[in-house]
Every structure is written in structure tokens, then in C-alpha cells.
Amino acid sequence: MSAPRDGLVRAILGPTNTGKTFLAIERMCAHSSGVIGFPLRLLAREVYDRVVKLKGERQVALITGEERIVPPGARYVLCTVESMPVRTGRSDRPSEGPLPSDFAFAAIDEAQLGIDPERGHVFTDRMLRARGREETLILGSDTLRPLVRKLLPEAEIVSRPRFSTLRYAGATKLSRLPPRSAVVAFSAEQVYALAEMLRRFKGGAAVVMGALSPSTRNAQVAMFQRGEVDYLVATDAIGMGLNMDVTHVAFAGLEKFDGRRDRRLTIAEMAQIAGRAGRHQRDGSFGTLGLGGDAGPGFSDEEVSAIEEHRFRPLDSLYWRSADLDYTTVAHLIGSLEARSDDPLLRPAPLSIDLAVLKLLAEDPAICATAGARARKLWAVCGLPDFRKVGPMHHARMVRRLFSYIGEGGHIPHEWFAAEVARLDNVNGDIEALADRLAGIRSWAYIAQRVDWLADPAKWAERTRTVEARLSDALHERLTQRFVDRRTAVLVRDIGAHGADALPVTVAADGEVSVGPEPIGHLAGFEFRVDPLARLADKRLLLAAAERRLGEELDRRAAKLCEASDSEFRLIEEAGGLAIGWDGHVLARLAPGRSLLEPAVRTARPLDRLSADKRARLRARMEQWVDSQLSRHLPALRQLAATAADPRTSPGVRALAAMLVDSGGLLPRRSIAAQIGQLDKTDRHALHRLRVRLGALDVYSQALLKPGAQHWRAALLAVRSGQPMPRMPQPSAATLDGGADSRGAALAFRRLGQHWLRIDLADRLATHAHHVRQHGGDDPIDHALATSLGLDEASVRHLMAEVGFVRAGEAWAWRGQRRSRRGAPRAPRPGNAFAALAGLKR
């Protein structure tokens, strides 16, 4: 690009959505060559793609700090303002590559950014010096008008009215944002948090930030443009000309950190962002996001009026830094960079990162002595952008190392460059990790674009592009995984369009529930289970979408289950208790009832979705099943219960039967010795007919030792006590070691020290001992049985002591059974079957 000439210079000024950028593209394509400088790499890439469609790839170049696509003979160049090919005098950092020396057309986009503290001096320089041979356009806000008149008196000023109306819509809750809304935040953390919330409420959002690579940004925007998501969360990067189908812009806040301090947005900045709403002739709206106490103050009446009417305070100055640099020494270079303009409209630019790094490096005497070509090289290296946002001190370390390699005309070592790129070539990790790696690879991509910094820059430019593409794809995938639930987005869109009652809900044979084409979960029994991949916050929406339409299916299942055979039901353990299951699903839980044999059946919560009548019928069917299982497995216990309630039976038998029922069919004989002593011969015959064994050690119903009976006895006792189901012994076990579950073992085993012996076998050994004693024998032990059972000496000695024998040298002596201490009788437990019969003992 040549120095300013007498070609036509026009300033196209106006608010957003006035077609300024479109006009610049149109005018450039009408010339034989042209260049446009944009504020963002993303915007340069977007326009590059558009011009390629018009002119073909061979005619169009793209130049940004990290990316260069420059076909031989390219006539149209789209670039960032920093990369515009300025080649006049002793300019700062001339661009590299096979580019023409001048262009027929030139344009600067968003020229009002000359007031930006960090980059403003670059925009000002291009506005003052970048000229097309035949035509130059300066695009910007109307706030530039007085400065254009004074700084560029030869320029023609053209005002462009906005195509559509922009109105203020007030504050809106996130959950009530209209479709096609963009939410603007001013930090990556807030962008991610808002996108997460929109995923919960609306099914997701696209994410756009200036730090994203073009491919990641394009992939995210494409989701929004195609309607896969109706919401966008972005930083203020969208204010810089990124064109999307947005109808409403919601500000998450009105303050930003500008690199130096937190400050309120200027009205011009507010308008630049709000103006993204309403493209072409579609009206748009703007407002704030209702975030409670964290939102801060909203728009003032003055700000609203200014934005709606596009009235902004004119700029009175721009930031400026000299482009006429003196490379005689580093000190001279710094002095020329800090030189002041004679024009009061051009004020000195604040200390930018490149100059800050140069000053830090100049503290080193060896670097400070740099002069001439080496000083020019040093300044070029200081121009490496701080993509990682680590600040001047840390960034200077990397710049120092780079300069140590290339300062004398050398190249960056292949091994170091390759190792750093390889370290970043990793697509694992979360969004933050991938974003950090993308920032890192941007530095190396920038370095690879410098033709004299590497021995093989073309190779490494391609390598860094490949790594950036891989990281970009991975980041897009992570953003989509984290912030987009397409299923929820479809539901939100369809509910909004048709209402929840109109959604077609289907249940497949395997229980998969779908709303329209989208599977949303499974119907497991009577419980709708949201897809496990769905996040907790999404479940309310999916449940609401399904439950409105699942009533018929639930009623059908309930009716079928009421007619099902007993084999369809199972007793299962669930949440530390016992429940009735069907096909692996919990239908009801057992709770303490009127007696051990009458547990209460409490229907599970999923059955609450049934009508009261259907639920009552199903509960009655489950009560019937429990009753049939008790009749099948515990007939002896039920017969004892009937005996205890039969007034024709003797009081002694009734009392003993009631006690056995209450204990589950087993009692230590010692605990009821007094009651047994009161039984007459008729009573004993009655108990014998009931198959109640009055053993030497235990009183029990022999039928209750069967595996099925033991299982149900354990279940009933666990339900009554509120404890989990005990671990049951193996059905064929005769003895148990000390590690057995004592609650399960106590149902049919007697403890002998560290071991357990089944009560019927203990009864046989005890009966044998009494038989030997009654017939005058000396050895009460049935050695054959004890040996076959594997009882050790300690267990035998413990059993004999329970029977009433003690060791006396080599023989056994009868001492009699230890009597239990008698005390005041305890009142029966309320609800105990024996409580109702307490009066029978009087």
C-alpha cells in the first residue's frame, strides 16, 4: 500500500446494520485490486469466504497474525488492521509475503476504534495513511464525523441510516428470553455460566468469543443460524460486525474490564453491541438480563434514548503512535514510539503490550545495545501478540528467547519449535484446557508466518494450522457437549410452537419413550426415567413432556398387572428394606402391619401417577400375592396363629402358639420353661399335631426349617424391625462359622461359642445326652454325630453346658440346666399377638 494519494476518500458513517461492510465489499470487487482491514480475525475470515465465492480462491488473500492465505498474484486482500500491508517510509513492522505494492481500493472497518486504549493507535494510523490508488473508504460510527472533517478535510462524508428499528425491551429473565436472542457477557467464566443455564432452560446455546479460532466460531454460529439452537452467548466480539440472525440482544452486565480497570460501557459501545439485533429490515430489541442482585444497574433513560435514536457524543480525539520509527538504537526506537503528535486531536496511546515488552527487554544492557537491523528485528519480535494473556513480564520471557535465536539472523531451533507444538497437539481435557492450548498454538502460528524466523516456515505454518484445526474441532465438540442438548432444544421449540399436549409421545416395546423423533428416556415399570445422559437440570422439562402423555400407557400396564399370575411378582431388597418387584421394578414396599403375618403394603411413588381406583386395585392384588406366599411357605406359622385365636383351644396352647407366632416360630426353651411346665398331656398332644417340637434346648415348628419358610420368616422379621434382610445361610448347611450373619443364623441355628449348629441337630445331641443319663450311661455325647458334623471340643463342651453337663476330669457330670433369672414380667409389645392373649394366663 502506498502513501496517501489524491484518490477519492470517503467516510461512510452510521450505526450498525447500515450495510457499510457490504458496501465496502461491493466497491472493492468493482476495482482491479483492493484491501480491507477488519478489527477481528473472525470478521476478516468471514468476509474472505464471501469474496472467494465472488472472485475465486486464486484472486483472494487472507492475512491475519496467525493465518496467511496468499495465492500468487492475489488481487484482493482481507486482513486485520494490524496486518494491513503498509509499506511507507520507516514504518513499523512491514508485512511479509508476495503482495502488491499498492491497491486500487482500500477500506478500514470500525475506524472509531481509534479510541480503543489497547489497539486504537493502529486504527488511527490506518485511517490516516492507508489509501487506495483510486478509492478509499473509512467505515465507522457517526461519532467520527468531527474528527474526519478536521483530520481528513479532503474526505467526503456519507451518512448511512439504519435499515431497521432498534427498541429497548427492558430486563428479561433468562428463562423467558425470546428465541433468536444473543446474551452478551464480558468474561469467559460468565459466558460459560450463562450458556450452562440456557442449556437447562432452553436446550442450549452457541458460544462465540474473540479467542475462538475461525473454524470453532463458524461451527458454533452455524448451529445458531441453522436453528439447532435458538440462543447465542457471546462476548462483545459480536459487536464488531459479526452478522447473525439475532432479533434480541440481552446484556448480562454493563461493565467490563478493559485491561486496566472495571468500567461502565460507553453509550457508543452499548449501541455497537445492541445494534447486532435486527438485521437488514427486521426490527430488533435490546435489554438487560434479569439476574437478581448480581445484574448491577441497568440502562439509564439517557442511554436508552441515545441508543434507540443513534445519538452519541462525538469523539474529540484518537489514540496515536508514530509509525516513523528510528532504529538507530533501542533508546532511539523507544523515543520514536513515545513521540507526541503536533496535532492535539491525536493523543499519545497508552502503554501497549509490545512497547511494554520492549522496555522490559531494554533493561538488559546487551539488548539495549542493539542497533540498526537488529533493533528492527527486536521490534518485530516484540510484536508477537500476547495471545495467552499472561501480561508483559511473562510475555517478555518468551520474546527474549525468540530474539536470542533470530537476533543475529539465525532461526528458531527446529527441536524447540516442534516440541512446543507437539505439547499443544492434545485434544483431551475440558473447554478451559482446550481454549488455553488454542491460545498457545496461536502464538506459534503467528511465529510460523514470519518468513525469516524459521528455516522452513511453510512446513510449520501448515503444521500449526493442522493443530489449530484439531483443537478447534475438539473445542467445538466440547462446547456442544456442555452447552447444547439438541433433544431439549427440539422439545422447547416444539412446545413453543404446538403446546405440550400436542406433542406425539410414543413408547417402544423396550420401554423407550420418544417425543416426536427425539428419545427422551425409558418407562421402567411405572417410572419414567430420563435418559441418563441428560443433566439433572434438564429432567424437569423431559418429565413434563412425557408425563402429560403417559397416563394411558400406565393404566394399561396396571390393568395387565392386576390380572397377572403370582409368578410375575418377586420379593426383592430395595433401599435397605423389602419390596414387591415386577420385572425388576419396585411396585410397593413392605412396612410393619397389624402383626408379623400381616405386613402393610405401601405402593411405590411411581404408582402415584395412576388414578386412585387403579392404584387401589393394584395394591389389593399385591396384598393378595403376599397372602398367597405366606400360605405357601409359612402354613405352619399361619396354623399357629389360627390356634392362638381359637377360643376352643386351651389357654396354655393358645399362649404358647401366640408367642411362637410373634417370634417367627422359634423360642429358646429356657425362656418359656414356666409356660411349658403348665402344659398337660392333652396340650402336648395338641402341640405335637401342630408339629411343634418341645426340644431340650429350643421350641420350634419343624416345618419352618425349610429354605422357603426361613426366607419368608427372615423377611417378615426384618420388615417388623425396620432392618435390612439378613444374609441367609446355605439351605443344606448344618454348621456355620463365626463369620455368619447372626440375624440370619438365629432363624434356625444355635450358637455354640464361635460356631453355630442347626437347632434340630443340636436337639438330637441334647436328646441323646438326656437319654444316656436316664439310662445310667457315663458318656452323654453322640460321638458319631458330633464327628460327622465337624464339631470341635470347644463347641461340644459349650453344647453340653447348655444341656446341663460339665466336664469332671475324663467324665461328664450332671449339674442341671441354668435357670433364667425370674423378675417382674414385662408388658407385651403393643400390637404383639401375645398382647391380645395376655388375659388368658390369668
Image (spheres, grey):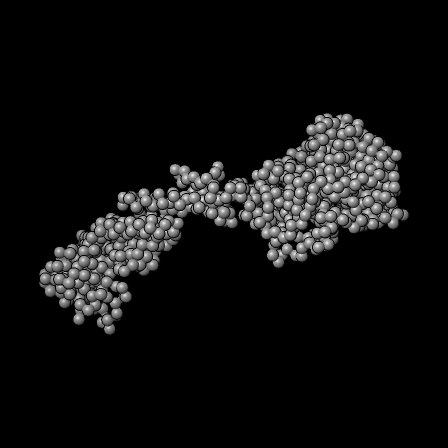
Residue at (71, 38) in percent of width and height: 43
Depicted 359 relative to depicted 160: above or below: below
Q: In which quarter of the image is residue 84?
A: top right
Q: Is residue 629 left or right of 93 when viewed as pictured? A: left
* Total numbered badges shown on the rendered structure: 0
Q: Where is residue 416 drawn, in percent x and y? A: 69, 39
Q: Is residue 94 left or right of 635 when viewed as pictured? A: right
Q: Where is residue 501 drawn, in percent x and y? A: 46, 44
Residue at (72, 49) in percent of width and height: 307
Residue at (58, 41) in percent of width and height: 229
Q: Is residue 623 visible?
A: yes
Q: Which of the pair 123/27 is nearer the observer? A: 27
Quadrant location of the C terminus in the rendered image: bottom left
Q: Where is residue 586 drawn, in percent x and y? A: 36, 49
Outermost residue, right side: 342
Depicted 643 relative to depicted 275: above or below: below
Q: Which of the pair 256/309 is nearer the observer? A: 309
Q: Which of the pair 126/754 is nearer the observer? A: 126
Depicted 360 relative to depicted 86: above or below: below
Quadrant location of the N terminus in the rendered image: top right
Q: Is residue 213 visible?
A: no
Q: Is residue 16 left or right of 226 when viewed as pictured? A: right
Q: In which quarter of the image is residue 281?
A: top right
Residue at (22, 49) in percent of width and height: 632
Q: Where is residue 417 drawn, in percent x and y? A: 69, 38
